[in-house]
Amino acid sequence: MTIDPNYHTYDPNDPYNIPGWTAVNQLPGPGTLTANPPAPFPADLAVQTVVATYMTESGQALPGSVLIQADRRYRDKVTGNLVVPNARRLKVVNGALSVDLPASDDPDLDQPFVYSVHEVLPGGRKFMISVPHNATGPLRLHDLVVDMDYQEIQPPRIYALSPSAGGF
């Protein structure tokens, strides 16, 4: 049996690479399906575009990805919708990253929240950000860093149902 080396790439530092399992929301690439776009956020919440650039001192673009996750559930006071945080894996393409995130201090939220950010690339860091609702975008990711302890982003749980556990 031979394995096609172009089927996928493996980064041992990426917490979402779980050998032997199919990843949820895989990045598009040879042999993988294109990930479904995320559902739209509630229309009354402010959404900001957050951007970042990753490059070496010589100007060469860095490859990698960035994981972002809200630190808690938040409720839209207008609609009553509850938004459950999930880790979003964003591919850094040609050294550039762009993502739309709900503002973490929107007045229509039950209370403010922050995001955990894990840069999975050479020299990457782990930090927390706050996305303001009243800023003019696009906003630079590293300008949003807040001084607080990083809250770890957990890899997705993998559940297996067996007949003894009530599955199948």
Image (cartoon, grey):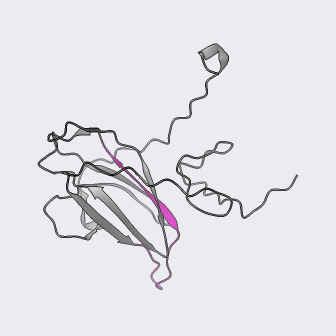
What residue do we see at 62% from left, 63% from top? 29
Q: Can residue 56 be seen in this view?
A: yes
| Along the line of sight, the residue nearer the viewer: 63 or 86 | 86
Q: Verify whether residue 141 appears in magenta.
A: no
**At which x and y percent is residue 17?**
59, 49
Left/right of residue 121 with respect to residue 142 in the rendered view: right
What residue do we see at 67% from left, 63% from top? 30
**At which x and y percent is residue 142?**
30, 66
| Along the line of sight, the residue nearer the viewer: 57 or 129 | 129
Q: In which quarter of the image is residue 162?
A: top right
Left/right of residue 83 with respect to residue 35 in the rendered view: left
**At which x and y percent is residue 84?**
33, 39
| Total count of labels | 0
Does residue 63 sit above or below 36 in this rendering? below
**At which x and y percent is residue 44?**
18, 51
Left/right of residue 98 with respect to residue 106 in the rendered view: right
Q: Is residue 141 visible?
A: no
The boundaries of the magenta stretch are: 54-71
Seen as rendered, the residue at the extreme bottom is 58
Q: In which quarter of the image is the C terminus?
A: top right
